[in-house]
Structures are given as C-alpha cells and as structure tokens.
Amino acid sequence: MEFYQAKPGVEVGHETYGRGVVRAVRPQTDERVAEADVYFYEHDAATNVPLLALEPAAAVTRTDVTDTDHGLTVTVDDGLYTVALRPDGEGGGFEVTLSLGNATLDSAHLSTDE
C-alpha cells in the first residue's frame, strides 16, 4: 500500500492478520520503514505493520461466478467474510450463506415462487 492511501479509518487487508482498519500512520524515517497501526478484526487486536505489507480492502475482495448444473453460483469473499448465492437445485430459489473461515454464521433460502 502506498503512503498516500493509508489514512485512519481506511480498511485494509494483510496476508497474515486478515482484514482490519488503519488507526494511525507513521511515515518512513532513517530508522524505520513507513508503517501503520492497524486494528485487525479477526484477532481483535491492533499491531504495527509495514505499509508495504498492506493492501486496500478492495484489492483483497474476491468474486467468483461458477456455472453449475442448476445455474450460476456467485461467491464474494471480502477477506474476512464470505457470502455465497447458490441455486437450490430444485428450481425454487437460492441458498444464501454467510461464512467466516470454515464456519457458517447464517444461511437462508430465497424463494423464486410467487
């Protein structure tokens, strides 16, 4: 991440710590590289990390559209949570799931029946 992108309140992603929000930014000096104080959601803790190790949250968001036998499956992963929309396989709607890692937090059936 570039220094000009890092501001307090900006959401970021880190390869090890996951998704978080910048609390403060420290510029590069002769003694240290530019770094940010980031609160990471999954770890419920703040830590200082080099700016070069961070990506804007939009850069860590991944989307995937897969064609299945029953229609398209859409998955959005924001680096912390994953939302998946899948055909129910019966032609009556879709299954929606919200996950954190391998744990399903919530799910629902969206009916296309009137």
Image (tube, helix red, strand yellow):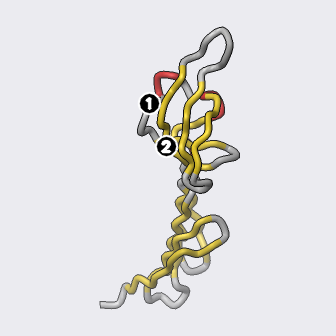
The residue that mark 2 highlights is 21
Residues 66 and 17: in front is: 17
Which picture quadrant has residue 32?
Answer: top right
Q: Nearer the viewer, residue 65 or 23?
A: 23
How far apart marks 2 and 1 lie (CA) works out to 9 Å
Q: Secondary structure at mark 2?
A: strand
Camera-nearest residue between 100 and 22 = 22
Question: Can you give x and y, in whole percent of width and height, for residue 8 in the image?
Answer: 43, 34
Q: Does residue 70 lie above or below 40 as drawn?
A: below
Residue at 59% of width from left, 56% of height from top? 42
Residue 80 point in image, percent of width and height: 57, 57
Label 1: state its secondary structure. Answer: loop
Residue 62 visible somewhere in the drawing? no
Looking at the rendered structure, the kind of residue marked 2 is Val
> Residue lying farthest left?
114
Q: Classify 10 Å Cα crowding around label 2: few (below 14), some (14-19), many (20 and above).
A: many
Q: Amino acid at mark 1?
A: Lys
Q: Residue at x 67, y 70 (%)?
A: 102
Q: Give me the disc on residue 87.
A: none
Residue 67 drawn at (x, y percent):
59, 69
